[in-house]
Every structure is written in structure tokens, then in C-alpha cells.
Image (cartoon, rainbow, N blue to C red):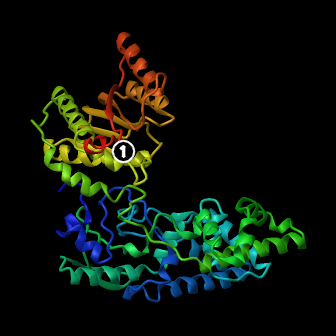
Amino acid sequence: MRQLTSLSTYLKKTRLDLETNDILDITLWIDNRYFIDPVLLKNSKIDEFLDARKLVLDYFSELIKMIKVSHLSSQMKQKTIDRLAVKEPQWLSLWYWWKRDTGCSISITVAENMIKTIIEILQIWIEDPEIVEVLSMFIQWYGPDSISDLTIHIIYEKFCAFTQRKSIELKIKTKKFTINNNKYYLPKNPFKDWPILFVPISLVSKLPLATDREEVKDAAQFNDSLRERVSELYFDSVREAILNMQYSDTETMQRIKKDLATIVEVYKTTEANNYDIKKDELGYYNIPSAVEGESKHILCKHKPKNNIELLSSIKELLWQFKKSIEDNWLNKVLYKDDGSLHREEIVQLLFYSIADIYCNIANIILWRESNWGRWPVDFFLGTWYHSKILIEAKKSNNNNLLSGYEKQLAAYEKSESSYYSFYLVIITKERKKDDQLSYVEELEKANIKLNKKTPELFIIDGIKYPSPSKLK
């Protein structure tokens, strides 16, 4: 089985089957950067999640009680930290779904900072459990993944029960798994002996409301009693005030209390919106269906047996990707509905999806660099260790286009196991005379003239032009 398989394809169901059952259809084994928003639990109509919001708030209420007495003993302090520094959730079909116990979703340091901050806030008598969620606006590293992970941890068995019920209704093949001492019949992961847990579309957001300052502020503009108070609110100044609360005078403490009370009030009265899969603002959701439609055009002439044949195959892959983008309208995936561009990761995931199809046919090993920024090359393709070809994929509007080429050049020069290297650039805006891509072209020419080992520049026109019918 190819590694990049959509959940619906693996389950032998249509995407519509999953969507009508409120199941998020994701691509297995790639980053699907969606989050569970605890606010969306408020109005959930899913049987398994009817009491989920109450469970989350009860958990935070208990946390606040524990924090009040956490100073009494080291044991009590550790219990309080453990309530926040929970393990990363496993097996959900989100961007982290395939991880297996890789540590805490909230670090010990962040948990300690949260406890310290809540202790300070308790001094001004704000004990609302939702303050725990709102703190993500002000505490570094307590971000959307932390809120999502903590929420999932609290209601984890709800996802198990939801998946079991939907699997029965959709007649999906399952296996018995024991989770938290309870037995569930769940679909098996295609690559490991792990379960897959379904995620309801109605609970997924681009960002949890608790981390989206602008959405909270915008929501307040529709509430007469809050509009003026929030318009005067500067979140960064509130953050600084919270961090320095222990040094504040009575007047400052009262101002902080008023600001926090306002934020909590807005947060509690605002209706969060779940992710719009049709609009697909992040760009991930539409990739599988677009690639599936293109897959019939992906052909492979031969399976490489040596370095020369490997290079020929990778060039064939790149030319097929170029045809897909330029001639078969796959470039539409790179753009949002309003015509603006998706982030560069969508370019990389689109290439990865096409390359996965080709490499599966050609029997070529495909690696993707999953830790962005750690290594200056996105993809490694090869037949064995000393036959690797490097590929870096960029949009032409990337401000680091030239430096990215120089970094890949340095990596290529140092790598003894790399046979060849490509620098793939997709043009996403009209070119100017002295743009960065021109400098990359000149650098490549200069290196070739000096007979220097250098990545080959491969350019694809990804600009979204009007269709012929609209030009008439």
C-alpha cells in the first residue's frame, strides 16, 4: 500500500460517506494541521460528546482547586503539574495522529508557568474554569496544539466511542483494542498495529478560539456591552501585566482583573466556527481529491537499477509534475478561494503526493523531511543509501529563495551519499527583471561554468491564469 492514502480510500468508503457521518477525511501520514476546539463542544449534537464540554470545565475547576493547595507539598505540586503536562494524544486522525508516546503535549516548564500565572490570577478572585483556556493568549508555548491536546486528553474515550459507533454504522472492518482498561472495536492503522480514531468535522477548527485574539476581538464588536471595553484592550499589555502581577499595585491589579474578566466574558459568549472543508482555508483537505484525479496521468517507463536510471526517473517525475501543474490545472490547489496563495507547505505536500504515486510504481524510496528547518532539503529519493537524489521545493515568492538555494548547495556539496540534487521552484507571481529567481538562475549558471557540483534548477509555472472561456 502507498504510504499517502486518504482515510476514506483506506476504509474503502467515499469521502462523502465520511463527511455525511461527520468524520474528517484526512490523508494518512502527512501533517493535517487541524485542532480540536473546546468551545465547539458546547453545542455538539453528537451523542458521545453531549456532556464533553462539562467534563472539560469540571477538569479545569478541579485543576484550580489543586493549584490553590499546590504549595502545601511537593507531592501536591507534582499532581497539579501532571494534570497539565499530559501525554500527547495517540491515534487520532489529525496532524499528530501517527505519533506514539513522544512525550508531553504541554512541557513541564510551560505547566509550571501556567500554575504560577493562575496562582497570580487567583489573587484577583477570577476562578472561572475557562480562564485555563484563555491563558493560551498570554503564555508562551501554550498554543493551539496544547489546547487541543489537553481537550482530547480529557475526553479521549469519547473519540473511541464515536469511532466504534461510526465503524459499526458504516460496516468498517475493525479490531479489538484495549484503551484505558476499556475494550473498543476500532479500525486498524494500515502501517502499525495501532487503532485509528475518527475526528468529528464539527469539532475541528483552524485555530481554537482560545488562541485566536483577533477572532475574540471581532466577536466582541457585535456585543454592545463589550464593544468599547474590548476596543481598548491591548493583548500584549495584558500579557505583560499578568507576567508582572506580583509587582503590581492595587490599581493595576484591578485593571488586570477587569481586562481578564472582559476577555473571559467574550470567550464564553462567542460561538466558535468549525473548519469549513469546502472553503478549505488551510489547503490540506482538497489535496487528496485533486491528486486522485491526476493519478491516472502518472506514468513510469521503467524501474531504475542504477544511478543513471534513477536520475532519468526523477526527471520523468518532475516533468510529469510540471505537466500536472501547468496543463492539468493542479495549480488550483495552491490558491485559496479569494485568489491568495496557500502557505508553501501546500506546494511541498502536493509534490509529495504526486511523487508518492510515481515512486510506488517505480519502486523508488521516498523520504520527506518532517522536521521543517532542521535540514535544508525537503525530499530524498533513491534506490539505496548511496543513490539519493535531493529535492527542495519552493514558491517563487519565498523571501528566502536565494538563501534556500545556497543552503541546499552547501548540503549537496557535503553529502557523500547524494548522487544529484534539484531545486524545484513553482512560479506563483509575475516575474520581475531582478527577482530572486533571476539571481538563483545566475548562480546556477556560474557554478556550472566553474564545473562546480550544484543543484539543478527546475522551474514550473504555477500562476493561476484565467480560463480560455473567460478571456473571450
Dividing the picture into quadrants, the one containing residue 231 is bottom right
SS for dot 1: helix
Dividing the picture into quadrants, the one containing residue 177 is bottom left
Is there any visible trace of residue 105 in the rendered image?
no
Quadrant occupied by the N terminus: bottom left
Dividing the picture into quadrants, the one containing residue 388 is top left
Q: Using the image as rendered, state which of residue 291 and residue 221 is in the foreground.
A: 221
Quadrant occupied by the C terminus: top left
Residue farthest to the left? 301
Q: Position of residue 134 (x, y in %)?
A: 63, 72
Left or right side of 360 for 222: right
Label 1 crowd bin: few (<14), some (14–19), many (20+), radius 10 Å: many
Left or right side of 464 for 12: left
Q: Position of residue 191 (x, y in %)?
A: 24, 61
> Residue visible at 74% across and 71% down?
228
Circle 1: residue type: Val
Q: Which residue is mark 1?
A: 347
Q: Position of residue 9 (x, y in %)?
A: 20, 64
